[in-house]
Amino acid sequence: MKIQDKSYVAIQYTLTLDSGETIDQSGDTPFSFILGTGQVIPGLERGLLNREKGEKLQLTIAPADGYGEFREDMLRDIPRSQFPQDMELKAGMPFEAQSPQGPLRFTIKEVTADNVVADFNHPLAGQTLHFDITISDVREPTAEDMMSCMPGGSCGCDTNTSGSCGGCAGGC
């Protein structure tokens, strides 16, 4: 079976940057998702279309098809007084704050005596992504598979590397 829209797909992968640094990998358990449901970045979805179980491939995904270009307008100055006084803040530090709309995640880009420059870009924005992939499974999704990509379901997000999830946007 070839991978098509709404196919259940399971892959083993290693994700590296232009520098060669490995930033994520599936490990022993394949990463699974339903293609076309917003669970993975657009470039990965397009690169997997019409592929089959057992295929090995390498995909290079430009920022526009991954987590977007780095945007200067996503940098904000926040008064240092808005952070706990006893907290040591450093550039590169991920941070999560509560807002009226829920959790707000950003990375600290710079710290001065008066201000903290917060970067609200995705941590991988502006990065070219290199995937080394083996397709472990392709099949029609089960009802349980479809439920896992519905809002409120589980999407198997791995937040240990980037601190965010591709999301299960829009359901199946």
Image (cartoon, rainbow, N blue to C red):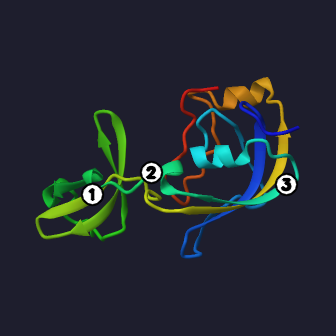
* First in residue order: circle 1 vs circle 3: 3
Q: Residue at x 12, y 70 (%)?
A: 113
Element on which disc 2 rests? loop
The amino acid type found where label 1 is placed reads Ala
Q: Nearer the viewer, residue 24 or 130?
A: 130
Relative to 30, 105 lies left or right: left
Element on which disc 1 rests? strand
The quarter of the displayed image where residue 36 is located:
top right
Label 3 near label 2: C-beta < 8 Å? no
* First in residue order: circle 1 vs circle 2: 2
> What residue is disc 2 on?
68
Q: Nearer the viewer, residue 15 or 107?
A: 15
Q: Residue at x 60, y 26 (%)?
A: 171
Between label 1 and label 2, give the one nearer the viewer. Answer: 2
* First in residue order: circle 2 vs circle 3: 3
Q: Disc 1 versus disc 3: distance between alpha carbons? A: 41 Å
> What residue is disc 3 on?
55
The amino acid type found where label 2 is placed reads Gly
Q: Disc 1 versus disc 2: distance between alpha carbons? A: 18 Å
The amino acid type found where label 3 is placed reads Glu
